[in-house]
Image: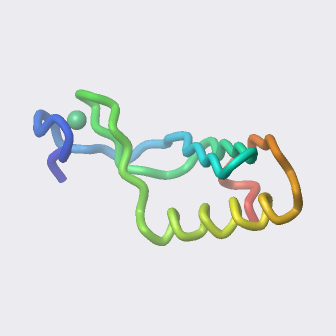
């Protein structure tokens, strides 16, 4: 698909990092599969993946963890 931000390039399969901030809680998930724009670097994460990440962020937040960095392929 054409990048929605810059409209300059076709996105390609790649990996990105996703950040969550919820109050005091900060979570970074690395190596998330996404479509990445080679022109501006914008990353588009599939909805199924985004839902999974949100669920994980909620779990980590409820466990009282304030700062966490995890790899996407380490998720259950
Ligand atoms: Zn772009």
Residue 7 occupies which quadrant of the picture?
top left
Asked if 64 appears above or below 15 in the picture, the reply is: below
In the image, taking residue 7 as reference, residue 16 lies left or right, namely right
Question: Considering depth in this image, is 75 or 27 the residue closer to the camera?
Answer: 27
* Residue shown at the point (86%, 51%) measured from the top left: 65
* Residue shown at the point (16%, 35%) measured from the top left: 6
In the image, taking residue 71 as reference, residue 12 lies left or right, namely left
Q: Quadrant of the C terminus?
A: bottom right
* Residue shown at the point (28%, 37%) measured from the top left: 37
Residue extending furthest left? Answer: 7
In the image, taking residue 52 as reference, residue 43 lies left or right, namely left
Residue 64 percent across, percent down from the top left: 88, 56
Residue 18 percent across, percent down from the top left: 55, 45
Residue 74 percent across, percent down from the top left: 76, 55
Residue 43 percent across, percent down from the top left: 38, 43
Question: Considering depth in this image, is 59 or 74 the residue closer to the camera?
Answer: 59
Question: Considering depth in this image, is 43 or 12 the residue closer to the camera?
Answer: 43
In the image, taking residue 5 as reference, residue 59 lies left or right, namely right
């Amino acid at each position: 698909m054409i990048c929605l931000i810059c409209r300059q390039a076709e996105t390609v399969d790649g990996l990105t990092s996703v950040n969550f901030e919820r109050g005091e809680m900060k979570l970074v998930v690395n190596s998330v599969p996404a479509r990445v724009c080679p022109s501006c670097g914008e990353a588009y994460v599939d909805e199924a993946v985004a839902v999974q990440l949100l669920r994980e962020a909620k779990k980590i937040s409820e466990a009282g963890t304030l700062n966490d960095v995890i790899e996407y392929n380490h998720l259950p």
